[in-house]
Image (spheres, coloured by chain):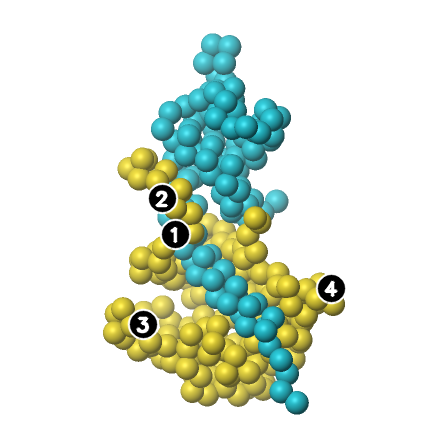
Chain colours: A cyan, B yellow
Amino acid sequence: MNLRRDVFQAIADPTRRTILLLVASQAMTAGAIASNFDTARPTVSKHLQILTECELLEQKQNGREIYYYINAKKMKEVADFIEPFRKMWDDRFNKLENIMKAYKPKK
Amino acid sequence: MEQKTKINAEEGKQDLVITREFDLPLELLFKAYEEPEIIEQWMGTKVLQLENKNHGSWRFETSNEKANMVFQLNGVIHEFSPNQRIIRTFEMDNVPFGVQLEFLEFEKLTDDTSKLTMHIIYRSAEIRDQVLKLPFTYGINMAHNQLEKVLSKLK
């Protein structure tokens, strides 16, 4: 499995970015996180599962509750290190795609 | 939206792989690497020389307006196989990164879509990491502003 690719897919989703933002300020239960969204609880659970699998979130048992907290190390690694490089290429390739979509062969 | 450009850079290795799927037929994607005037548009460089053939050479020039600097890029083309593959070296003048070896594989996915896989090999893992950090060092905006906020909270 290509873990890094999955991490980028994880942070590409706006709902998951909001979750990361929420959990960055304090560790939260799945219920508390879900209460911030209009989407169905299972949808939020799925997002939490993806973020956990990518190691952006970690779970900690506290009594009967499971709290989600952010994995700062992973977040920094992904966001600091490679994302600007990826973005640079993505911008470049988007440009290429747009130019070639408008391309009319000279005949 | 799923990200179209992906980077796979395993820790401690001296290479990386960039993949991208395009909503373009293979021939149009390849043309964007073949025609100097098109390269100039999307790379933002001036093409001084481009010999699209085995054992040809290439020279580009790019200017950074902010830094008021001009960079020369150059290399040799080891293999040029239209709509399939370009193998070339890449070097930027006056930077300490040395030469990198690039394997560009062009693939047809459907009649209207194609995929580019760029495998880049650096002289060492340290140099690869330095090159990866360049856009960050130059302060290119991060893709996800929200993540920046998250990061500022972590500091």
Q: For label 4, count other residues whose C-alpha is less than 10 Å away and answer few (under 14), some (14-19) or many (20+).
A: few
C-alpha gap between disc 3 and disc 2: 25 Å
In the image, what residue occupies the spot 26% across and 70% down?
Answer: B67
Which label's residue is closer to the chain start, 4 or 2? 4
Q: Which mark is residue B110?
A: 4
In the image, what residue occupies the spot 42% across and 87% down?
Answer: B48
Which label's residue is closer to the chain start, 3 or 1? 3
Residue to which mark 2 is pinned? B148
B35 and A106: which is toward the camera: A106
Q: Chain of mark 2?
A: B
- Residue B4 visible somewhere in the drawing: yes
Q: Chain of mark 1?
A: B
Type of amino acid under label 4: Thr
Q: Residue lying farthest bottom?
A: A107
Q: Position of residue B53 (x, y in %)?
A: 58, 86
Which label's residue is closer to the chain start, 1 or 4? 4
In the rendered structure, the answer to whether residue A43 lies left or right of residue A58 reads: right
Which label's residue is closer to the chain start, 3 or 4? 3
Q: Which mark is residue B64?
A: 3
C-alpha gap between disc 4 and disc 2: 37 Å
Residue to which mark 1 is pinned? B142
C-alpha gap between disc 3 and disc 4: 37 Å
In the image, what residue occupies the spot 50% across and 14% down?
Answer: A65
Q: Is residue B85 above or below residue A29?
A: below
Q: Position of residue A29 (x, y in %)?
A: 48, 20
Q: Residue lying farthest top?
A: A63
Q: Are marks 2 and 1 on the same chain?
A: yes
Q: Secondary structure beneath disc 4?
A: loop
